[in-house]
Image (cartoon, rainbow, N blue to C red):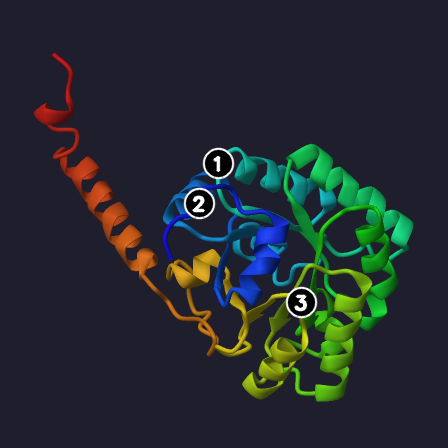
Amino acid sequence: MSKPNSPMTVPNFIKAKSEGRKLAVLTAYDFLWAGLFDQAGVDAILVGDSLGMVVQGHSTTLPVTLDEIIYHAKTVMRAVKQALVVVDMPFLSFQVSPAQAIENAGRILKETGAAAVKLEGGVNQARTIAALAEADIPVMAHVGLKPQSVHKLGGMKVQRDEQRLLADARAAQQAGAFAIVLELIPRQISAEITRELSIPTIGIGAGPDCDGQVLVNCDMLGLTEGFRPKFVKRFAELRTEATRAVQQYVTEVRSGAFPSDEQSHH
């Protein structure tokens, strides 16, 4: 798909489904990568709480704070000109009450300039999604494997309870979500959800029948080490190339080859 001529909006994001246009989404957490992805033509950038793992080095997303996600979203927004920017609501920033969710989502939009928030949940967060929608805060839902519920779920496992998944997806749409992430769901179930819903489904480990796809940028670019789930395709191996470059730099500095006369001022 070519780069759009005008910035992506929530209505245009929704309309992509009826137009049969697949949506390409990536995570980004800083100015550099957000600008690159935006120029490359992604439809949306998710400032995910996955930053807790790939940026901060935690084993789960749970430690990420509201202030931290706002900081990263601000840096992303400085770079983005076209893509729709969606910001994750971290653990315990929306679960206490709908009023708490409105206050914190409002902070995210007000302080970052992003277009929408994302929160994990379906049936159990329907009241909160509805409250956000009523406050005119665009909200993307997230069902299936919910990383913030990792302890309850007993790990990062494929979610196969079809009735529960369908109920969650229906509840999120009915409550007013403009899109929904489907994570680690068997292909046939995500295909059924996608057929039934009128809002776009964005898959991660949910097969090709969704209305769009999202991947964590570091996984897709081959920057992560030792983490290769089935659903990730590494479109590059930047970790290998970056390691080679750094090793060459170290070698040339130690040998005196860098800087050479070419890199010196006279």
Left or right, residue 262 beside residue 243: left
Dot 3: within a 10 Å radius of its alpha carbon, few (fewer than 14), some, or many (20 or more) residues? many
Residue contact between numbered discs 1 and 2, judged by CB atoms under 8 Å: yes
Per the image, label 2 sits on a secondary structure element best described as helix
Q: Mark 1 or mark 3: name the one nearer the start of the chain.
A: 1
Query: Image point 10% across, 25% down: which residue?
Result: 262
Query: Image point 40% across, 70% down: which residue?
Result: 233
Type of residue at label 2?
A: Asp
Q: Position of residue 12 (x, y in %)?
A: 57, 52
**Nearest the camera: 89 or 3?**
3
- Labelled disc at residue 147: 3
Residue that carries the numbered disc 1 in the rendered image: 79
Query: Image point 78% across, 46% down: which residue?
Result: 136
Q: Of discs 1 and 3, which sits in the foreground? A: 1
Residue contact between numbered discs 1 and 3, judged by CB atoms under 8 Å: no
Left or right, residue 209 beside residue 64: left
Dot 1: within a 10 Å radius of its alpha carbon, few (fewer than 14), some, or many (20 or more) residues? some
Q: Position of residue 148 (x, y in %)?
A: 71, 64
